[in-house]
Image (spheres, grey):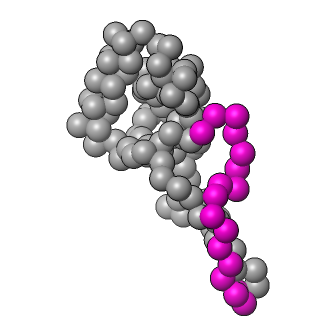
Amino acid sequence: MPKFVTIGYGDQEGYDRTPAAIRNAAHAHDAKLQNDGVLMGIAGKPVQVRNHDAVRVETTNGPFMKSPLPIAGFAIIEAADMAEAIDMVSRTPCAVAHGVVEVWPLFTNADGCKP
């Protein structure tokens, strides 16, 4: 079954202005996804890693990508297609609490994708 990487963005202000019943339903939905085997986690502090020409490893604290909302978390989901993946994430906390969730198809070498 196809896999998708999801990235949830959201902030405390958006979360707080969402009615508690909607937030609670979203958390229950996340719990169901996790019970069904979705790998999900809260984003920690990132580190950028560079090793240009395989000569010297350089690291920089902080994200490379910039967004108006902070990254809240990530998940790896399996779904029949993009439409099902969108449906799965449309009821998560970031999607309902004034944030946004990106859904990225995840291709592997087994899918015929070149590294």
Residue 82 to residue 105: above or below: above
Whether residue 97 appears in this view of the structure is yes
**Residue 31: x percent and y percent?**
28, 31
| x 70%, y 39%: residue | 67
Q: Nearer the viewer, residue 71 or 16?
A: 16
Total labels: the figure holds 0
Residue 10 horizontal side relative to residue 27, left or right: right
**Residue 111: x percent and y percent?**
53, 56
Determine which quarter of the picture holds residue 21. Answer: top left
Q: Nearer the viewer, residue 75 or 57?
A: 57
Q: Residue furthest bottom?
A: 55
Whether residue 84 appears in this view of the structure is no
Q: Nearer the viewer, residue 17 or 10?
A: 17
| Quadrant location, the C terminus | bottom right
Residue 100 horizontal side relative to residue 21, left or right: right
| x 38%, y 18%: residue | 23
| Quadrant location, the N terminus | top left
**Residue 14: x percent and y percent?**
54, 21
- Which residues are the magenta region? 54-70
Residue 69 to residue 17: above or below: below
Q: Residue furthest right?
A: 53
Residue 109 horizontal side relative to residue 22, left or right: right
| x 72%, y 90%: residue | 55
Q: Residue furthest left?
A: 35
| Main secondary structure type of the part rendered in magenta | loop
Residue 40 painted magenta: no
Determine which quarter of the picture holds residue 49. Answer: bottom right
Residue 68 horizontal side relative to residue 87, left or right: right
Residue 55 painted magenta: yes
